[in-house]
Image (tube, rainbow, N blue to C red):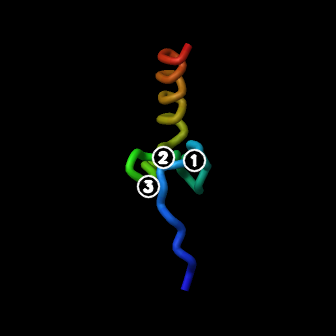
Amino acid sequence: MAAMKPRTGEGPIEVAKESRVIAMRIPADGGGRLVIEMNATEAAELLEALKSVVG
């Protein structure tokens, strides 16, 4: 039986290319992670939207 890892909301945001999608894992308050899958076009749109807010 595999060891169970605790699901915490701590840690960095992780982004990885997985086969045909880009998966972004964001720590969530209360534990766990929010997983968002997007294609390259959506990732580019997200990048531009973040640049306009962050500067």
How packed mark 2 is, by other alpha carbons closer than 10 Å (few <14, some 14-19, many 20 or more), is some
Q: What is the tally of numbered marks visible in this picture?
A: 3
User: x%, y% of residue 7?
Assistant: 47, 60
User: x%, y% of residue 24?
Assistant: 52, 45
Q: Foreground: 51 or 17? A: 51
Task: Name the quadrant of the C terminus.
Answer: top right
Type of amino acid at the residue the image marks with label 1: Gly
Secondary structure beneath dot 2 equals strand
Secondary structure beneath dot 1 equals loop
Task: Name the quadrant of the N terminus.
Answer: bottom right
Q: CA distance from mark 2 to mark 3?
A: 6 Å
Q: Which residue is drawn at the image coordinates 45% and 52% (left, top)? A: 33
Q: Earlier in the sequence, mark 2 or mark 3?
A: 2
The dot on residue 27 is: 2
Type of amino acid at the residue the image marks with label 3: Gly
User: x%, y% of residue 35?
Assistant: 45, 50
Q: Which residue is drawn at the image coordinates 42% and 46% (left, top)? A: 28
Q: Earlier in the sequence, mark 1 or mark 3?
A: 1
Secondary structure beneath dot 3 equals loop
Vertical relation: 53 (above or below) 44: above
How packed mark 3 is, by other alpha carbons closer than 10 Å (few <14, some 14-19, many 20 or more), is some
Q: CA distance from mark 1 to mark 3?
A: 10 Å
* Residue at mark 1: 11
The dot on residue 32 is: 3
Q: Foreground: 11 or 35? A: 11
User: x%, y% of residue 53?
Assistant: 48, 17
